[in-house]
Image (spheres, coloured by chain):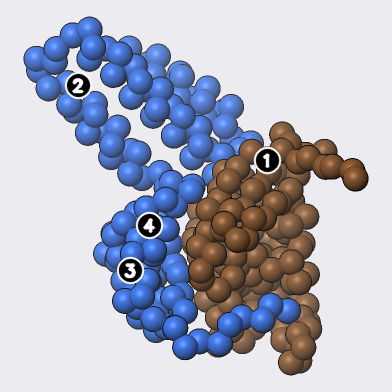
Amino acid sequence: MAYYQLDFTHLHNYDPGKPGIGLLVTLRSGLAEVTVATKVDSGSTFCVFERSWGEDLGFDIESGHLEWIGTPMGAFRAYGHPVTLSVLEFDFEVMAYFAADASFNRNVLGRHGFLDRVQLGLVDYEGRMYLSQFGGNGSQ
Amino acid sequence: MASETIERVMSQVAALTSPLTLGEKLTVAAFLIDQAKQDAAAKSDDETPTNGVSQETELESKKIKDDIPDRYFRREYEWLRQHRHEYPGQYVVLEGDKLFAHGPNGRKALAEARQAGAKHPVVVRVEAEDELPFGGW
């Protein structure tokens, strides 16, 4: 049997008793910033946030890059805007998508903009998330 | 240190950090504060303050440190662990272990928190106990 080993620089403890794998992240645009609770979602192609937080950063939401995002129950519109996404001690320049619908109340960290920027290990039973910046110490 | 020397150093620091992101600049600032605190601690081991300068330095250091958010949000996570059940279905806005605002409208709560003096507020929507589990996409 082959064994594999990964090394990580950071550990985040989350509450495994709560729904989702929670992580607080900060979004920045210029001098504006907002820190919100998110869930890591490997099934999501993009990092998607509530409209309010994009507006709070000063974005004209509909002027961003339109994406239709599919779900099992249908599709919704979201608009991409460039932000700095800060997670623990990492800063990523990414495209964050803000839902057009103001009633959308989810914030998720998906593949583009988060999972493709990190090396991630999960021990969900213990609520442990191990993280390294991809390309940094610990990356293969 | 003469004021012109400080100005020169600050101008060099500004030049060196200009390519950094805001988060990276905050990390550098936190590093400098830690260095200053260590220097102050080492100095206080050698001499007893007689004119309050050390206390002033400590207070100033604490004030600056309070302006820099903890990137691990330890106190916010602890507050949520202890109090989230008190605010089901609401947005709570925290800074450290202090609750600044809460309510059903996150943006309104955030605005209230900033008005109340929160500099780096954290917004969390607390899920209600009877809320359906998120299915992902």
Earlier along the polypeptide chain: callout 2 or callout 4?
A: 2
Are circles 3 and 4 on residues that touch, CB within 8 Å? Answer: no
Q: Position of residue B75 (x, y in %)?
A: 37, 53
Horizontal relation, residue B95 to residue A13: left or right:
left
Task: From the rendered image, report the letter of the chain displayed in blue.
Answer: B
Task: From the rendered image, report the letter of the chain displayed in brown.
Answer: A
Q: Secondary structure at mark 4?
A: helix
Type of residue at label 3?
A: His
Question: Can residue B6 be seen here?
Answer: yes
- Residue in the picture at 59% in, 70% down: A20
Q: Position of residue A6 (x, y in %)?
A: 76, 41
Type of residue at label 4?
A: Glu
Q: Which residue is mark 4?
A: B78
Output the chain of dot 4: B
Quarter of the image for residue B104 reads bottom left
Above or below for B77 versus A104: above
Above or below for A34 versus B37: below
- Residue in the picture at 44% in, 83% down: B128
Q: Which residue is mark 1?
A: A8
In the rendered image, residues at marks 3 and 2 fall on the same chain? yes
B135 and A4: which is toward the camera: A4
* Mark 3 crowdedness (10 Å alpha carbons): few <14, some 14-19, many ≥20: few
Earlier along the polypeptide chain: callout 3 or callout 2?
A: 2
Q: Which residue is mark 2?
A: B54
Question: Can residue A86 be seen here?
Answer: no
